[in-house]
Amino acid sequence: MEHEKKEQVLRALREEMSADEALPLRESNFVFGEGSAESSLMFIGEAPGFYEDKLERPFVGRAGKLLDRLIEAAGWKREDVYISNIVKRRPPENRDPFPEEIEAYKPYLAREIEVLNPKIIVPLGRFSMNYFLPDAKISKDHGRVFRLKGTRLIMPLYHPAAALRSTSVLQELEKDFAKLKVVVGKADELITAEGKAVEEAGEEKKQETLL
Ligand code: URA
């Protein structure tokens, strides 16, 4: 899809979502994804928090500042990647989103991904990871590279909020970001690579661990 067209479809999706009264958490502000529609890299968090709700932008609080720092340390700019969340309105008191809330937002996330068509999706934390890899465990599977239906890579990372609470998680996240940089550099090769071990997790979601 051409750049202009992508931007246009994203804008329409944003408007449709923000007007959808069937979506839960309507008492909070609507926080859509932002960044470059041309990026090969899409980060997906869980749900907006306090500052995200106030500013109506994803990852602008403390966790967002850490994410910015990691993105810059990898040599990228925040505006050159795309950053979004599964659930696009803040749950009260920053509680975890309920399964039915995640379910309600899922079809829209699928459309957002389809339009952006990123080569690499980086789920941040377990909620986002389990959308792609239902059986994965963040402590075991963070930093591993999975291939989804032969079209793109999924590399789950710890959520930056978890790294703010634990030095060892922060160290793991920094290590994984260094690896992400390498993965971005050879994404095409990894997407088409053959002869790797295949893991099945969920009927439709054929996954291959690549690294
Ligand atoms: N945590 C998330 O998962 N998303 C945000 O946008 C901010 C904090």
Image (cartoon, rainbow, N blue to C red):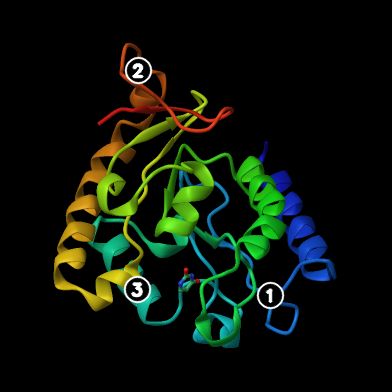
| Mark 3: C-beta under 8 Å from nearest atom of ligand 1 | yes
Q: Nearer the viewer, mark 1 or mark 3?
A: 3
Q: Which label is found at residue 193? A: 2
- Nearest the viewer among 38 and 136 is 136
Q: Quadrant of residue 114?
A: top right
Mark 1 or mark 2: name the one nearer the start of the chain.
1
Query: Which residue sits at x=52%, y=79%?
Result: 95
Residue in the foreground of this view, choosing between 108 and 93: 93
Q: Secondary structure at mark 2?
A: loop
Residue type at tag 3: Ala
Q: Residue lying at the far top in this picture: please name it.
A: 195
Residue at position x 24%, y 39% in the image: 182
Q: Residue at x 74, y 62 (%)?
A: 14
Numbered tag placed on residue 30 in the rendering: 1
Give the alpha-carbon distance from disc 1 to disc 3, as whole Å.
21 Å
Q: Which residue is mark 3?
A: 161
Between the C-alphas of marks 1 and 2, the distance is 39 Å
Local packing at callout 2 (Cα closer than 10 Å; few below 14, some 14-19, many 20+) is few
Answer yes or no: is residue 54 visible.
yes
Q: Name the spot of residue 205 as percent of width and height, x first.
A: 53, 30
Query: Label 2 amino acid?
Result: Ala
Where residue 129 is drawn, which disc sits there? none
Secondary-structure class at tag 3 = helix
Mark 2–mark 3 distance (CA, rounded to whole Å): 33 Å
- In front of the other: 119 or 204: 204
Contact flag, marks 1 and 2 (Cβ < 8 Å): no
Give residue 92's position: percent from left, percent from top: 59, 85
Using a 10 Å C-alpha cutoff, classify the residue at mark 1 as few (fewer than 14 neighbours), some (14 to 19) or many (20 or more).
Answer: many
Query: Which quarter of the rendered picture does the C terminus lie within?
Result: top left
